[in-house]
Amino acid sequence: MIDVFQIVGFIALIASSVGFFPQLIKTFKTKKAEDLSFYTLLLLMIATISWIAYGFSRSDLFIVWTNLIIFILVFMLAIMKISYKNSSKF
């Protein structure tokens, strides 16, 4: 039998993860990230790491996977923010 909360968790996983793709794609295409706040990205990474730890403590794979995907996407944005800032100086 399918648990309703598993469906809700799956929807949360997809919606939360997909939400970062437009920004990631735009930043990659334009090679501009000056409008992204590095501190916001850092706080999002800290939050997702905390949620991953919480998800493991509760044995909740939806929390773990959702936040792992979000962490990877935010980390990629942070790398682009650093990389594109350094490359624009030359």
Image (cartoon, rainbow, N blue to C red):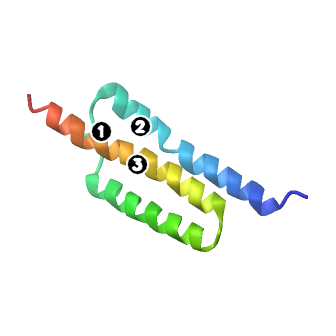
User: Pointer 2 and pointer 1: residues touching (CB < 8 Å)?
Assistant: yes
Q: Position of residue 37 (x, y in %)?
A: 28, 51
Residue 42 is situated, as x and y percent measured from the top left of the image, at: 32, 58
| Residue at disc 3, secondary structure | helix
Q: At x 83% / y 61%, what residue is drawn? A: 3
Q: Which of the labelled discs sits on residue 24, or is there none?
A: 2
Quadrant hosting residue 12: bottom right
At which x and y percent is residue 5? 76, 62
**Sequence-wise, which precedes: disc 3 or disc 1?**
3
In the drawing, does residue 86 fall left or right of residue 37? left
Residue 80: percent from left, percent from top: 29, 39
In the rendered view of the protein, which quadrant contains the C terminus? top left
- What whole-number distance in Å separates the C-alpha atoms at marks 2 and 1? 9 Å
Query: Which quadrant of the figure has residue 66?
Result: bottom right
Query: Residue flagged by tag 1: what amino acid is it?
Result: Met
Residue under label 3: 74
Disc 1 element: helix
Q: Is residue 85 left or right of residue 19?
A: left
Residue lying at 23% horizontally and 43% vertically, measured from the top left: 82
| Label 2 vs 3, first from the N-terminus | 2
Q: How crowded is mark 1: few (under 14 residues within 10 Å), some or many (20 or more)?
A: many
Residue farthest bottom in this picture: 57
Residue type at mark 2: give it.
Leu
Q: Residue furthest right?
A: 1
